[in-house]
Image: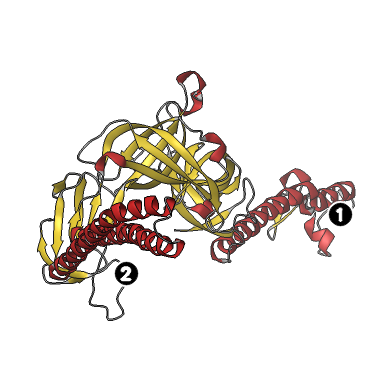
Amino acid sequence: MSSSNKVLHRGYPLGTEAALGHPVENAGDEGKHLVDDRVALLDSLRIERADHGEVGSGRARWAGGIVASIALIAVAGWLLLAPSNALTVNAATATAAPGAAAVQRGSILDASGYVVARRQATVSAKSTGRVVDLEIEEGQRVEQGQVIARLDDTNARAALARAEAARAEARARLDAALVAVNNAAPTFARNQQQFARAVISAQDFDVAKASYDAARSSVDVEKRGLEVAEADVEVAERNLDDTVVRAPFAGIVTVKAAQEGEMVSPVSAGGGFTRTGIGTIVDMDSLEVEVDVSESFINRVRPGQNAAIKLNAYPDWSIPGHVVAIIPTADRAKATVRVRVAFEQKDARVLPEMGARVSFLTDDDEAPSSLSAQPAVLIPADAVQADGDTGVVYVIRNKTIERRAVRLGARTDLGQIVLAGIEPGTRIAVGDLSALADGARVHVEE
């Protein structure tokens, strides 16, 4: 059998049997072919290292991707489930300042206060007595000197009658003294002539002179007695007049404190059943607004400065006014200074003790342009780090905070007024701001 016809023997290529120890036909003639076949067989069984490397690298890439995915899933789960290290802050929302939806052009400071009357009096009687007639009601207008009440005057009238009788008696005694001195005068003149001509003795003349001098002195005494009696009558008349209570000035009755039949007294009674006043009268023409301005901003206010007044009862009604005076003392408890603001216009709608808000204005050419359209907002007092008329707030944006400078107005009982820097609806951090920084991540609690 030729080598060209030998293809497979027992499932192996030609030459495999010899290589494996099996006999092969025509071994001598085909020895060279057997060696070549053995080399070919070995080459066919060899595993290429390059092919093995490519397969191994693919598997490694698959394994690395799986490990990376597991790691990413683990990290994401840790971020979602692990406790956050962000700072926890409380949040508040800036709101439009009440009574001032927007700061008017030229407004540099807002302050709140109340309408008060410069002339207001609780009227009482000058003496203690029982009310027999009361002629006032709440809301009634009275004029100066108008009778508003009458007290029981029986005792006062009796005292006046007695004083008048004593005056009449004193006048009668004076008349008697004048008659006596008039009668003694001619006798004394005649005794003088007789003594000059030595008709009577010196002793008789001295007796006549003493009698005349006593009569003259009696006239002087009776004159002083009459003056005392007249003064007593005047006192009794005033006591009687004090039983009639009159309005000290024109105004409106705001309080009716007593009723007919009650006892009233200018001093407090120990029993507690005596009224100290009859009614309260307010001069409506003397109404003005008193506001408390923080001492940090009092340098923005001056006497005569123009102001805009808005009553809480009429927030859309702006009343022109001006600063009357700055009370030259500060309240150490509130760190404020009291300022009086007068109304330029009188109106019956303005009532005492109404809440009011005052915007202190500057001249148009001095008004800060940044305030022309800037809305005034109200924020909690602990949401700002104040430094004079400026401050810092921390605005919340998603889960981070932004440090922002603001321009401050007055601090009121409701909170801090901010004139510029933030708008209504802005969410800001409140509470302890010392640990916050610009860009810090926070966990927000409303």
Q: Residues at badges 2 and 1 in contact (C-beta under 8 Å)?
A: no
Residue type highlighted by circle 2: Val
**Is residue 2 shown left or right of residue 168?**
right
In the image, 278 versus 304, the foreground residue is: 278
Within 10 Å of disc 2 (Cα), the crowding (few <14, some 14-19, many 20+) is: some
On the image, the x and y values in percent for residue 327 come to 50, 44
On the image, the x and y values in percent for residue 399 come to 53, 51
Residue type highlighted by circle 1: Ala
Per the rendering, the mark at residue 27 is 1
C-alpha separation, residue under disc 2 versus residue under disc 1: 155 Å
For the point 75% across and 43% down, the residue is 4
In the image, 293 versus 219, the foreground residue is: 219
Per the rendering, the mark at residue 188 is none
For the point 25% across and 56% down, the residue is 183
Q: Quadrant of the C terminus?
A: bottom left
Residue that mark 2 sits on: 267
On the image, the x and y values in percent for residue 64 come to 67, 55
For the point 34% across and 41% down, the residue is 288
Question: Furthest residue to the bottom?
Answer: 271
**Is residue 70 shown left or right of residue 236?**
right
For the point 25% across and 58% down, the residue is 230
Tell me if residue 239 comes above or below residue 101 in the rendering.
below
Q: Of helix, strand and loop, which one carries label 2? A: loop
In the image, 4 versus 129, the foreground residue is: 129
Mark yes or no: residue 138 visible: no
**Is residue 196 shown left or right of residue 42?**
left
Within 10 Å of disc 1 (Cα), the crowding (few <14, some 14-19, many 20+) is: few
- Residue 107: image quadrant is top left
Question: Furthest residue to the top?
Answer: 365
